Image (cartoon, rainbow, N blue to C red):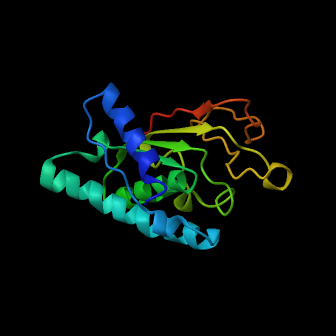
Amino acid sequence: MATEAPRLQSMKAEYLLYDDLNVVVVDWLSGSGPPYTQAVANIRLIGAIIGRLVLDLEEYFGVPPSAVHLVGHSLGAQLGGYTGEYLKGRGAKLGRITGLDPAEPYFEGTDPVVRLDPLDATLVDVIHTDAGPIITGGMLGSRVCLRPVGVACGSGVCLRPVGPVVSELRLGRA
Ligand SMILES: [Ca+2]
């Protein structure tokens, strides 16, 4: 994790400046490298491992899954969807998932079971900063809005934002 460690440690330090939290940084650098298709496949297992960790936190330390907030970027954002699915399959639900520019290739238009979706946690919010067609701009971020059920989403696709935009805040069903 040599190249990622300073950035992730910096992020952890920033979180701790603002609140009394326990921060767990997941090092999956060895599974996130090329080829991209392998990294896409790897997140299913890593998401399940994180889900197991969340259940262990509850069993051994009394931390309910509803108190856990996952934050992931690109494939890490889609990975959070797998964690949410893993927990839902075991009668638990994450409190929150924040997806930062969820990866688009191999996810857009797929079943919600294999991507981040609004039902993967009680609150799922997504911040898009690089959404756009990969063939025109080399962007990898998903353009799909994750709107609350019943809220219109226009064409179903967010336009490429100028800056960070929170495209969705959703309070899920208990
Ligand atoms: Ca999902």
* Residue 15 picture location, percent across and down: 36, 34
Q: Quadrant of residue 114?
A: bottom right
Question: Which residue is depicted at the point 60% across and 49% down?
Answer: 102
Regarding residue 89, the answer to whether it shows in the image is no
Q: Residue most toward the right?
A: 136
The quadrant of the picture occupied by the N terminus is bottom left
Left or right placement of residue 141 versus residue 1 in this view: right
147, 149: nearer the viewer:
147
159, 8: nearer the viewer:
8
Q: Residue most toward the top?
A: 18
* Residue 47 picture location, percent across and down: 42, 61
Question: Which residue is depicted at the point 43% across and 47% down?
Answer: 6
Q: Quadrant of residue 164?
A: top right
Q: Is residue 66 above or below residue 54?
A: above
Regarding residue 125, the answer to whether it shows in the image is yes
Q: Quadrant of residue 53?
A: bottom left
Question: Which residue is depicted at the point 44% across and 59% down?
Answer: 2
Question: Which residue is depicted at the point 67% across and 49% down?
Answer: 141
* Residue 169 picture location, percent across and down: 52, 32
* Residue 117 picture location, percent across and down: 54, 49
Left or right placement of residue 136 versus residue 83 in this view: right
The quadrant of the picture occupied by the C terminus is top left
Left or right placement of residue 18 versus residue 73 in this view: left
Across the whole image, how many numbered discs are drawn on residues? Answer: 0
Q: Is residue 22 above or below residue 104?
A: above
